[in-house]
């Protein structure tokens, strides 16, 4: 029998709702550079990111999540990734958070760096150092 402890050994996928798959495809592939995974589903886009999967699907509830939907752990490359995304027209979010200072688009707390941006439907996506 598969117990809940076994979930810790399994991969998990970020599942992100969007209104328009064409707009989402342009963003996730064109701006973020994700490579699509073949899917037989007409209402779903799937992407591989590292060892993870991102599932993008059409939904009437797209953009209603006001919390971070997915975060990429990019190590020491936060500033470089922010700059590359900004060059592709991605706008970054700025938040006032206790214990964090912002330098440009990057929030810092000690050695930790983080940045947030939104997809075209308003889903919040993040970058974080390890």
Image (spheres, grey):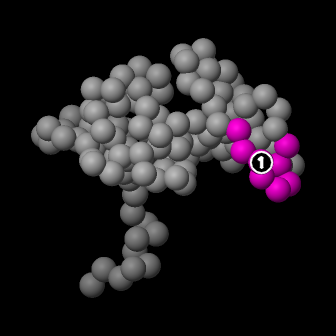
- Image quarter of residue 1: bottom left
Residue 88 in the image: x percent, y percent? 54, 16
Residue located at (33% from left, 26% from top):
23
Residue located at (46% from left, 34% from top):
119
- Between 83 and 75, the residue placed more toward the observer is 83
Q: Relative to residue 67, is residue 18 drawn left or right?
A: left
- Image quarter of residue 10: bottom left
Q: How busy is the neighbourhood of tag 1: few (under 14 within 10 Å), some, or many (20 plus)?
A: few
Image height check: is 72 above or below 8?
A: above
In this rendering, does residue 68 appear at all? yes
Taking the magenta stretch, the answer to whether it contains residue 98 is yes
Image height check: is 17 above or below 77?
A: below
Residue 124 in the image: x percent, y percent? 53, 44
Q: Please name the residue that numbered disc 1 is placed on.
A: 96
Q: Which residues are magenta?
A: 94-101
Q: Residue furthest top?
A: 87
């Amino acid at each position: 029998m598969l117990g809940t402890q076994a979930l810790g050994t399994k991969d998990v996928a970020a599942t992100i709702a969007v209104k328009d798959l064409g707009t989402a495809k342009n963003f996730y592939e064109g701006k973020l550079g994700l490579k699509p995974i073949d899917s037989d589903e007409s209402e779903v886009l799937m992407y591989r990111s590292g060892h993870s999967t991102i599932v993008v699907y059409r939904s009437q509830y797209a953009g209603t999540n006001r919390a971070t939907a997915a975060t990429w752990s990019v190590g020491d490359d936060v500033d470089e990734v922010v700059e590359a995304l900004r060059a592709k027209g991605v706008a970054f979010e700025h938040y006032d958070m206790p214990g964090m200072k912002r330098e440009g688009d990057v929030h810092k707390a000690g050695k930790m760096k983080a940045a947030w941006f939104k997809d075209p439907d308003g889903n919040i996506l993040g970058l974080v150092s390890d």
